[in-house]
Amino acid sequence: MLPGILSTALITGCASIESFHAAPRNVCTGDIVNVTWQAKGTVELTSTPPAHQTSASSSEGSAQFVVQESTRFALKASRLFSKKTALADVVMVARESKEFGDLAQCESPAEGVGLALVLKDPQVSSALQVATVTNMNARPIVLRKENVRVAIMPGQTSSAFSTQPAAGAWEITAALNPRETCDEALAELHDRLSIRIAFSCRE
């Protein structure tokens, strides 16, 4: 475990943790993770497994850690007889996959259902590359990122975006069926479009 980080003097009142975050959440070996927090009381920051500490602060501040594997950070705040704990996980995702999506909307003109999906810190590390992308929707989609555009059938996996950075702007479009309205398409899709990205790490 890392040594406890500095504390504030005890003041009448209960311990509290207003915020505690670790970013990016999905990382590669050797990435720098920024941990930020705001708390009241005596604070202690630890990690499992222990991560290399490069900076530290008091009960309100930030620290940077170089991670070599999936890591759980824990912040504990105590004051008098009260204690609070918050957890933040970062995950090594190379050779694994994660689903990303959001609420879709009708495109104008109403030729289909679309979603502009932007992946960035704190979701993904800049070191993460795409291995494959899988269509998680009940109908075919057209997926675009930078200069790559590919049609993917439901449940199908494509390597067309291989080695592109995972971070950036993705566009997902699902066409309407003949005589289908956009509202009907949204109902079939449960108002959501999503893709599953399998990652690799930049050499």
Image (cartoon, helix red, strand yellow):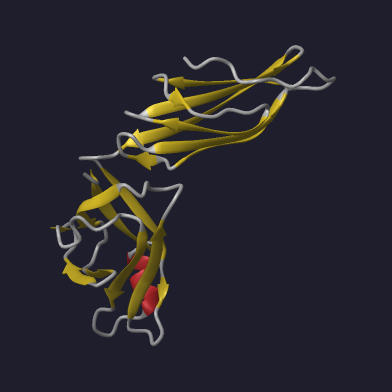
As drawn, 109 above or below 144: below
Task: From the top left corner, tell me how far across and down residue 107 is, in percent.
Answer: 39, 80
Task: From the top left corner, tell me how far across and down residue 170 is, in percent.
Answer: 33, 65
Single out the residue that lies furthest toward the right: 12
The front one of 186 and 78 is 78
Residue appearing at x 41%, y 37% in the figure: 32
Left or right of 88 on screen, residue 78: right
Single out the residue that lies furthest toward the top: 81
Q: Considering the image in quadrants, where does the C terminus appear?
A: top left
Task: From the top left corner, tell me how far across and down residue 13 is, in percent.
Answer: 82, 22
As drawn, 50 above or below 164: above
The front one of 114 and 168 is 168
Residue appearing at x 57%, y 36% in the figure: 36
As drawn, 85 above or below 181: above
Single out the residue that lies furthest toward the front: 54
Residue appearing at x 44%, y 37% in the figure: 33
As drawn, 200 above or below 72: below
Task: From the top left corner, tell me how far across and down residue 35 is, in percent.
Answer: 52, 35
Give the quarter of the image for residue 113: bottom left
In this figure, what is the number of numbered marks? 0
Give the quarter of the image for residue 109: bottom left
